[in-house]
């Protein structure tokens, strides 16, 4: 059964870099059928796609975040990671990782979410 | 302002039918890109509810159905149950943004 688990600091200072890792189990992260994506949700607000990565390392980013985002994959560890630099309070959100079908829907299989607060 | 527009809230009595709309444009739904729907309960991760316009993942009751026409899509729920009370989000691909886009979400209240 596919499981995804986010991990990383829950508190990041303004102007610093947010770093999260998603560990995948129950499926191969090297599957040619899927992408692996990051989605965030500010408290009380809607969902925002951050970006996705293919096992080969090819990335796709939300244009509104592209200048600050890096997503990478480590197939040997069955993990993919998110880095968001120069964070502000507006980046405070629950960050989800999810498997993305090649037809671009997310799931089945989302992480439980990781709340990251940007505050000094 | 979301690229895909949903009503902030809808409501219906138990047993009734409700629909949630998702309005896009010629660069997303109108261009023929698939629409997907998610259900989210408070404190939980979103769950895939409908994929590629009209397809239900295994385990999703047949009371849920999806449709698409022109630049809009809809999620219909028949035989409304108290357990359906949740937030619902639509998602598609936008060619002008070259990426996935979500609707702003709709809160369903079962009266």
Image: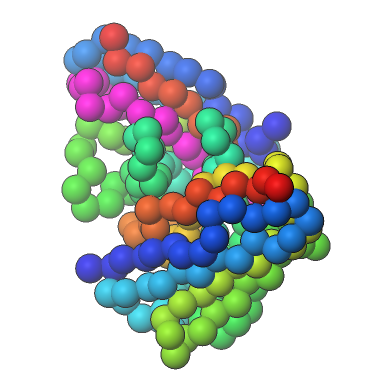
Query: Which residue does the image show at 27% across and 51% down from the upper left?
Result: B57
Relative to residue A53, is residue B38 depicted above or below? Answer: above
Query: Which residue does the image show at 46% across and 64% down from the upper left?
Result: A7
Q: Is B87 included in the stretch rendered in magenta?
A: yes
Q: Is A102 included in the stretch rendered in magenta?
A: no
Res A66 seen here:
no
Q: Is residue B52 rendered to the left or right of residue A63?
A: left
Query: Which residue does the image show at 61% across and 36% down from the upper left?
Result: B4
Q: Is residue B88 rendered to the left or right of residue A12?
A: left
Relative to residue B104, is residue A14 depicted above or below? Answer: below
Query: Which residue does the image show at 68% across and 70% down from the upper left?
Result: A70
Res A2 seen here:
yes
Task: Measuring from the top left, give residue B101's x and y in whole percent.
Answer: 61, 47
Task: Measuring from the top left, give residue A109's x and y in whole percent.
Answer: 35, 59
- The span picked out in magenta is B76-94
Q: Which image quadrant is residue B15 in? A: top left
Judge by depth and name the residue closer to the eye, B31 or A116.
A116
């Amino acid at each position: 059964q596919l499981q995804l688990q986010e991990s990383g600091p829950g508190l990041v200072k303004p102007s610093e870099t947010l770093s999260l890792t998603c560990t995948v189990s129950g499926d191969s992260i090297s599957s040619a059928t899927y992408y692996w994506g990051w989605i965030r949700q500010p408290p009380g607000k809607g969902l925002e796609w951050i970006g996705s990565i293919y096992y080969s390392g090819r990335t796709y980013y939300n244009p509104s975040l592209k200048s600050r985002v890096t997503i990478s994959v480590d197939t040997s560890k069955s993990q993919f990671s998110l880095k968001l630099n120069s964070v502000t309070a507006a980046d405070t959100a629950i960050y989800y990782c999810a498997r993305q079908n090649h037809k671009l829907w997310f799931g089945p299989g989302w992480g439980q979410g990781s709340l990251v607060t940007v505050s000094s | 302002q979301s690229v895909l527009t949903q009503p902030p809230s809808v409501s219906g009595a138990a047993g009734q039918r409700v629909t949630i709309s998702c309005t896009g444009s010629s660069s997303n739904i109108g261009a023929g890109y698939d629409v997907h729907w998610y259900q989210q309960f408070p404190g939980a991760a979103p769950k895939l509810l409908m994929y590629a316009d009209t397809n239900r993942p295994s385990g999703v009751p047949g009371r849920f159905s999806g449709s698409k026409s022109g630049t809009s899509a809809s999620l219909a729920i028949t035989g409304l149950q108290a357990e359906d009370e949740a937030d619902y989000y639509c998602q598609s691909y936008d060619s002008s943004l070259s990426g996935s886009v979500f609707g702003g979400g709709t809160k369903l209240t079962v009266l």
